[in-house]
Image (spheres, grey):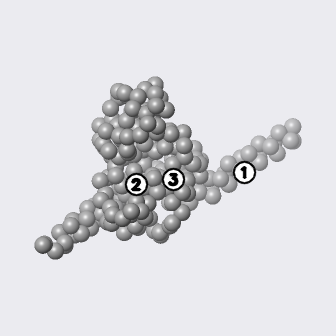
């Protein structure tokens, strides 16, 4: 009987410890997206946001399409061989394809984890944020753009790093919050160009 109580206490302590390990900023970002119906609301039990878990390409596309506010087509045409029309993510992925957020390829790899830079690119595309530079290094272009528009606080160069759920929630929330500032800055960039 005592062993049961000890086990229960350890499970409870671990659960509470994992919640306290999450920063309030990360929880606030998740709650903000939940209020906008972009992700499910777990504000009563923040550990259910699973902020430190990786996130798949399929899950990311649902967030991206809901963020965009664009129409999501309920019909799927099996445009990716590994994403049948019966898959719940098909409508989000194919809608993203229709809006050119992603490129047409034979496969989508829905169960693969997404990288930080891939998710940032999709979030910026969903909010129609223009890149501030166009070079041969698309990863750097998107990272520099996010930094220039205050979506991320510091630059990073590990472009293969997998995104955690908190990362996507945080950059998505930041992009929404900075939307007006981004538009204003983009207008300055394009109107300040010298005429030829």
Q: Which residue is mark 2?
A: 121
Q: Which residue is mark 1?
A: 13
Separation of residues labelled 3 and 1 (CA atoms): 32 Å
Separation of residues labelled 1 and 2 (CA atoms): 38 Å
Q: Earlier in the sequence, mark 1 or mark 2?
A: 1
Residue 10 or 160: which is nearer the viewer?
A: 160
Separation of residues labelled 2 and 3 (CA atoms): 10 Å
Q: Residue at x 43, y 26 (%)?
A: 85
Q: Residue at x 54, y 46 (%)?
A: 113
Q: Nearer the viewer, mark 3 or mark 1?
A: 3
Q: Which mark is residue 115?
A: 3
Q: Name the residue furthest top.
A: 86
Q: Nearer the viewer, mark 1 or mark 2?
A: 2
Instruction: Answer whether labels 1 and 2 touch (C-beta < 8 Å).
Output: no
Q: Earlier in the sequence, mark 3 or mark 1?
A: 1
Residue 7's spot in the image, x, y percent? 80, 43
Q: Secondary structure at mark 3?
A: loop
Q: Residues within 10 Å of mark 1 (few under 14, many from 20)?
A: few
Residue 33's spot in the image, x, y percent? 42, 48
Q: Earlier in the sequence, mark 2 or mark 3?
A: 3
């Amino acid at each position: 009987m005592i062993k049961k109580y000890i086990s229960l206490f350890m499970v409870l302590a671990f659960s509470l410890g994992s919640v306290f390990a999450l920063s309030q900023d990360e929880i606030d970002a998740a709650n903000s997206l939940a209020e906008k119906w972009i992700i499910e609301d777990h504000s009563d039990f923040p550990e259910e946001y699973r902020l430190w878990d990786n996130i798949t390409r399929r899950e990311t596309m649902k967030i991206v399409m809901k963020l965009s506010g664009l129409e999501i087509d309920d019909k799927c045409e099996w445009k990716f061989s590994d994403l049948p029309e019966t898959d719940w993510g098909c409508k989000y992925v194919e809608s993203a394809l229709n809006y050119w957020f992603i490129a047409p390829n034979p496969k989508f790899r829905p169960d693969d984890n997404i990288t930080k830079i891939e998710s940032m690119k999709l979030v910026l595309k969903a909010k129609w944020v223009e890149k501030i530079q166009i070079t041969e290094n698309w990863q750097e272009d998107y990272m520099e753009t996010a930094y220039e528009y205050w979506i991320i606080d510091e630059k990073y160069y590990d472009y293969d790093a997998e995104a955690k759920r908190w990362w996507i929630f945080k950059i998505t929330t930041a992009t929404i919050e900075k939307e007006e500032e981004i538009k204003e800055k983009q207008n300055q960039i394009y109107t300040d160009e010298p005429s030829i």
